[in-house]
């Protein structure tokens, strides 16, 4: 996939490609990926483009206005219609519900040196690295249709996630001692 780039937007790396490849393989088993899909933190739009290519009706959000502009250019160049909105997590979509929610969240604890505050927001998920994802999972039940799933790229470097979710692991890769994995989370019957 040929993507335009912007130095103020997270450039797809091994985590992005792992998530995209997993979604492509999982789409035959999980029809939710062909339905209405919300991608949070779209960045360059690589995941939203993958979901659109799978047949999903994709809405993508990002806090970074440069990311929204870049994702829009990439979607146009790829010939896909993706609804793009700027804002934090679920704020841009109001009370809408989706068949699936997908996110490659910022998952690192602070400590990197970034020349741009937008890049820091794209990779640092809070003091333990998990706070962004914890907020996402707190809001997800209000935006997920029954039977839907939350698809996340997770890192061994991040803190713990909240209880109340059934978790199914998919692909996992070791990158220089950091384990990256894709999981599908669904609301627990008892939760």
Image (tube, helix red, strand yellow):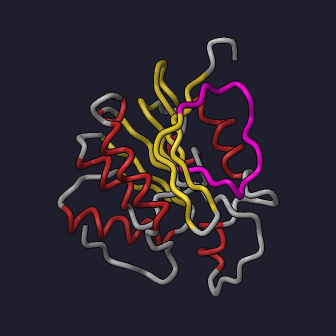
Reply above or below: 120 against 88: below
Point 72% across, 40% down: residue: 161
Q: Nearer the viewer, residue 132 or 59?
A: 132
Q: Which residues are magenta?
A: 153-168
Q: Does residue 23 appear left or right of residue 142 in this picture?
A: left
* Residue located farthest toward the top when viewing the structure as drawn: 190
* Residue located farthest toward the left when viewing the structure as drawn: 79
Q: Is residue 6 magenta?
A: no
Q: Nearer the viewer, residue 76 or 10?
A: 10
> Residue 112's spot in the image, x, y percent?
71, 78
Q: Nearer the viewer, residue 16 or 4?
A: 16
Point 46% across, 26% down: residue: 148
Point 46% across, 58% down: residue: 42
* Residue located farthest toward the right when viewing the structure as drawn: 127
Reply above or below: 109 against 27: below
> Residue 43's spot in the image, x, y percent?
47, 65
> Residue 144's spot in the image, x, y percent?
51, 29
């Amino acid at each position: 996939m040929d993507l335009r780039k912007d130095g103020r937007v997270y450039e797809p790396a091994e985590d992005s490609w792992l998530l995209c490849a997993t979604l492509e393989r999982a789409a035959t088993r999980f029809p939710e990926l062909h339905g209405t899909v919300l991608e949070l933190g779209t960045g360059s739009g690589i995941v939203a483009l993958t979901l659109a290519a799978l047949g999903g009706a994709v809405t993508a959000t990002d806090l970074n206005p440069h990311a929204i502009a870049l994702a829009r250019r990439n979607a146009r160049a790829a010939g896909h219609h993706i609804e793009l909105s700027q804002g934090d997590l679920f704020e841009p979509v109001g009370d809408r519900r989706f068949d699936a929610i997908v996110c490659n969240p910022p998952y690192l604890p602070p400590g990197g040196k970034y020349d741009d505050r937008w890049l820091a927001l794209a990779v640092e998920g809070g003091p333990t690295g998990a706070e962004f994802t914890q907020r996402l999972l707190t809001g997800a039940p209000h935006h997920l249709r029954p039977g839907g799933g939350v698809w996340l790229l997770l890192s061994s470097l991040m803190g713990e996630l909240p209880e109340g979710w059934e978790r199914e692991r998919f692909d996992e890769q070791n990158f220089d001692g950091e384990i990256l994995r894709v999981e599908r989370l669904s609301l627990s019957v008892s939760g």
